[in-house]
Image: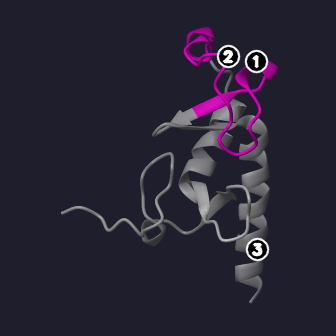
């Protein structure tokens, strides 16, 4: 059965908001009247964080063209960033780190209440 089109899905693993603990979205511009177009779930943030701690193989780094941009910040792979791919979207190491800190803050706030 097909999922309804109004459900938020992680741009990297395809899980719905209901299937994960947290989802972080990147707003498209202009921010007025628009919904985020790129989402990443807590599971994919964890996977990305784990991958950052490992050195990407030369083959893996070369498989992403230098013209590809991070779907969150818009910086290119040519700027020396590590990019992770998923379902036609990319996220760089800086954005993974930022998303991890946002996720940690949100989960800490939930536990405090």
Crowding at dot 1, Cα within 10 Å, few <14 / some 14-19 / many 20+, comes out as: few
Residue sitting at x 77%, y 46%: 97
Residue that mark 3 sits on = 108
Crowding at dot 2, Cα within 10 Å, few <14 / some 14-19 / many 20+, comes out as: some
Quadrant of residue 18 within the rendered picture: bottom left
Determine the CA span between mark 1 and mark 3: 35 Å
Asked which secondary structure carries label 3, the reply is helix
Residue that mark 2 sits on = 66
Of 44 and 77, which appears nearest the observer?
Answer: 77
Asked which secondary structure carries label 1, the reply is helix
* Contact, mark 2 vs mark 3 (Cβ under 8 Å): no
Left-right relation of 16 to 89: left
The mark lying in front, picked from 2 and 3, is 2
Whole-percent x and y of residue 37?
A: 58, 55
Of 40 and 57, which appears nearest the observer?
Answer: 40
Which stretch did the figure color magenta?
A: 57-84
Residue that mark 1 sits on = 78
Residue sitting at x 71%, y 27%: 82
Whole-percent x and y of residue 107?
A: 70, 72
């Amino acid at each position: 059965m097909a999922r309804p089109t109004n459900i938020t899905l992680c741009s990297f693993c395809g899980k719905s908001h209901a299937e994960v603990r947290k989802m972080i979205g990147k707003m498209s511009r202009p921010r007025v009247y628009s919904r985020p177009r790129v989402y990443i779930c807590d599971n994919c943030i964890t996977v990305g964080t784990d991958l950052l701690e490992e050195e990407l193989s030369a083959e893996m780094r070369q498989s992403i063209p230098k013209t590809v941009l991070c779907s969150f910040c818009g910086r290119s792979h040519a700027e020396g960033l590590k990019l992770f791919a998923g379902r036609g979207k990319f996220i760089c190491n800086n954005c993974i780190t930022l998303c991890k800190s946002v996720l940690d803050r949100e989960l800490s706030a939930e536990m405090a209440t």
